Amino acid sequence: MKKTDLLVIVFLNAPAFGAWAQPTLWDVQFSYSYDYQPTQTGAAVIGNSGDQWNLCASAGSGAQTLFDSTGASGSVSISWNANGAYAPLNAPGYYGFYGTADSSLMDGYILATGSDTITVSGLADFSNYTIDLYTQGDFTSSGRALSVTTDLGTYTSSPTVPTASTFVEGQNYLVVSAETDASGTLNLTYAPTAGGEADVNGLQITGASPVPEPSSFALVGLGGFLAWLNLKRRK
């Protein structure tokens, strides 16, 4: 075997773009109390029947370890701050999702009157994630709207219709993209844009796809050159 052949084989087998993580789903439900409401189970906008959810109660917390939708725990954790946490009366007329499969998720929430942050750590580094963020589910939320900002952009909901009993993208949930940093951390900043308050009922986090580092592009260029050189010598 020629040296050039060996170099090309080594390049083709090198992890130039890093290890591709298997898609994983983490489900998070916010509330003001661990004792007030049942924990959501199954799918929301995404997911499957039988999926498990993490209940995160209180207006703020240090790192809380998350299990994924299958119940498997790992290194992923979430922390958040808020101006408060709330849940309306669990009765007909107090929120549109009452009596539906998503009533537990849309019953409780954390709230921001200014700018607050949700941080997820322990994810794959330099990777893109999608976050389905649920918002404004109760009768007091009429006319409220929020913005969510990540390093990839800002996403804004339209004013809420509190009697909605199904998920409407852009109204009571947003699909947000975010990229982790070198430590596998992503941040979401949420703030009100109308109604004086931004409410977050929960999150579904899924991903990831690695983002090529600059050194990866250099390896691609080197590999292409070696392949060309090998082909030229064969001819």
Image (cartoon, rainbow, N blue to C red):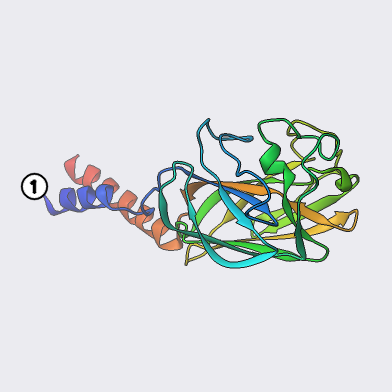
**Which x, y percent locates residue 106?**
72, 42
| Mark 1 surroundings: few (<14), some (14-19) or many (≥20) residues within 10 A | few
**Which x, y percent locates residue 28?**
59, 49
**Which x, y percent locates residue 204?**
59, 45
- Could you tell me how many numbered marks the image carries? 1
**Vertically, is 152 above or below 103?**
below
Q: Residue at x 48, y 62 (%)?
A: 184
Nearer to the camera, 166 or 3: 166
Where on the picture, by quarter, is residue 149? bottom right
**Vertically, is 46 above or below 157?**
above
Q: Residue at x 39, y 53 (%)?
A: 17
Residue designated by label 1: 1
Where on the picture, by quarter, is residue 44? top right
- Quadrant into which the C terminus falls: top left
Q: Residue at x 80, y 38 (%)?
A: 91
Residue extending furthest toward the bottom: 62
Q: Secondary structure at mark 1?
A: loop
In the image, 86: left or right of 70? Answer: right
Q: Residue at x 80, y 55 (%)?
A: 198
Nearer to the camera, 127 or 92: 92
- Type of the residue with mark 1: Met
**Which x, y percent locates residue 222?**
33, 56
In the image, 187: left or right of 109? Answer: left
In the image, 198: left or right of 58? Answer: right
Residue extending furthest toward the front: 35
